[in-house]
Amino acid sequence: MLIWSEEYAIHEPSIDELHKKLFDLTNKLTKAIEEGDNVFIADLFDTLEMYTLYHFSGEEHVMNISNYPLLNEHEALHQELTKQFHDFKDKYSHKNIEDFSTIKAFLESWLRNHILKEDLKFGKYLKENKLNKN
Ligand SMILES: [Fe+2]
Ligand SMILES: [Fe+2]
């Protein structure tokens, strides 16, 4: 289960709220898969994918208006994550991955590592340039 805590904080409220919501959706999806709730699984996969795209574009917008120098690299990482999720969803729906611990490990690390490594770099940039709001 993903639990949002200060270690994930960018200190840009709009982005932190998006990340909390993504954690929540991921937990719902993992739980639905564990319980074999097929109606919810398909819906949650779609919702998580859409919400991820929404979050990426929101994040890129904040980076853009903050003149973040690593914006291009960050956009490329978002594209790579989008592809990874899409491939994972595809494999899952074709029953090419059925082991729950593998599924759970992918879903929980897929965005988490990006937030901890890359999004936090942006948080640091905001702080150093006194652009953050709290
Ligand atoms: Fe993010
Ligand atoms: Fe990001």
Image (cartoon, rainbow, N blue to C red):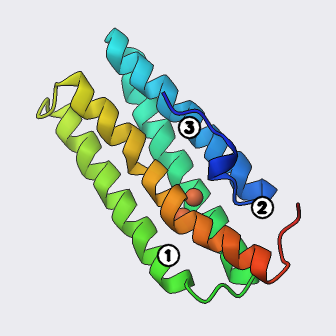
- Amino acid type of disc 1? His
User: Mark 2 or mark 1, which has the lower sequence index?
Assistant: 2
- Is 23 situated left or right of 100 in this image? right
The numbered disc on residue 12 is 2
Query: Residue 111, can we see it?
Result: yes
Residue at 61% x, 89% y is 69
Residue 2 drawn at (x, y percent): 52, 33
Q: Residue 29 versus residue 125: which sits nearer the camera?
A: 125
Label 1 CB less than 8 angstroms from ligand 2: yes
Q: Residues within 10 Å of mark 3 (few under 14, many from 20)?
A: many
Which residue is label 3 attached to?
Answer: 23
User: Which residue is depicted at the point 63% across and 49% down?
Assistant: 7
Depth check, front residue: 90 or 30: 30
Helix, strand, or loop for circle 2? loop
Percent position of residue 109, x then y: 39, 45
Asked if residue 22 lies left or right of residue 111, the reply is right
* Mark sitting earlier along the chain (3/1): 3
Answer whether labels 2 and 1 touch (C-beta < 8 Å).
no
Instruction: Name the residue located 25 percent from the left edge and 44 percent from the top edge.
Output: 88
How far is the residue under mark 3 from the one under mark 1?
20 Å
Question: Which amino acid type is marked by label 3?
Answer: Phe
**Residue 38 shows in the view:** no
Three-letter amino acid code of the residue under disc 2 = Glu
Q: Does the CB distance between marks 3 and 1 fall below 8 Å?
A: no
* Figure quarter occupied by ligand 2: bottom right
The crowding category of the residue bearing disc 1, from other C-alpha atoms within 10 Å (few below 14, some 14 to 19, many at least 20), is: many
Quadrant where the C terminus sits is: bottom right
Q: CA distance from mark 2 to mark 1?
A: 17 Å
Q: Which residue is mark 1?
A: 74
Whichever of callouts 2 and 3 sits on the residue coming sooner in the sequence is 2
What is the x, y in percent for residue 86? Answer: 31, 50
